[in-house]
Image (spheres, grey):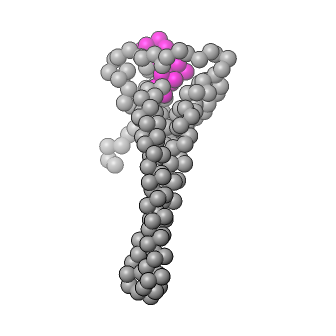
Amino acid sequence: MDNLTLKQLRAKQSVRVTFKLSPETIVLLRSMAGQLGIRQKTLFDQLIAASDLMAGGTPASPGAAPEPQRRRQKTFVLSQETVDTLNQLARRHNVPRNLLVEMFIHRLRPILAEEQERHGLRRQLLPDLAQQTAAMADLQARARRLLGSDDPLTREVSQLSQAAQAAQSRIMAIVAQGESLADL
């Protein structure tokens, strides 16, 4: 803590910044932050920090730019350091800050495509999961019928069946969380 300076403290200070972005860009950022389980601010900070633009590269085009009338305001809470970096990059490359933000966010598209593919594979496993959970419940009922509910094997199978049902619920929640990616 001895080496901490006022400049370092200010760099970490959070500030509110408003950009005009396309609705698609806003949805992309929100969905990816939700899927990755991190805050939009954190994702945005990481996109800026990991940018190859910092090394002096040139901005990559995000594809066809949305029409200006389709843009809407979106306010982020970012670190002052991120805002300063963004402003420097915009000046250095003579690119409007709003466009630069869109470029950064659109760098998430390959990650989105990968997550959409993984989500499809998760969905393919659901029928097998349901079948296995049902088989476990059938085994539990059979053990109870043959051995009685007080038998140690029946109790173990019951715990196993309950664990399978709980795991299935958690897995269904994971798949439900990923459903927002399916339509992007």
Q: Residue at x 47, y 51 (%)?
A: 126
Quadrant where the image shows the C terminus? top right
Residue 48, percent across and down? 42, 29
Q: Nearer the viewer, residue 2 or 109?
A: 109
Label the magenta part by its dominant secondary structure: helix
Q: Residue at x 48, y 69 (%)?
A: 137
Q: Nearer the viewer, residue 68 or 173?
A: 173
Residue 1, percent across and down? 34, 49
User: Range of the magenta residues?
Assistant: 90-105
Taking the view exactly as shown, the residue that stands out farthest to the top is 94
Q: Residue at x 44, y 32 (%)?
A: 113
Residue 124, percent across and down? 45, 45
Q: Is residue 109 magenta?
A: no
Is residue 71 at least partly visible in the picture? yes
Task: Using the rendered view, name the quadrant where residue 139 is placed.
Answer: bottom left
Q: Total label count?
A: 0
Q: Nearer the viewer, residue 152 or 163?
A: 152
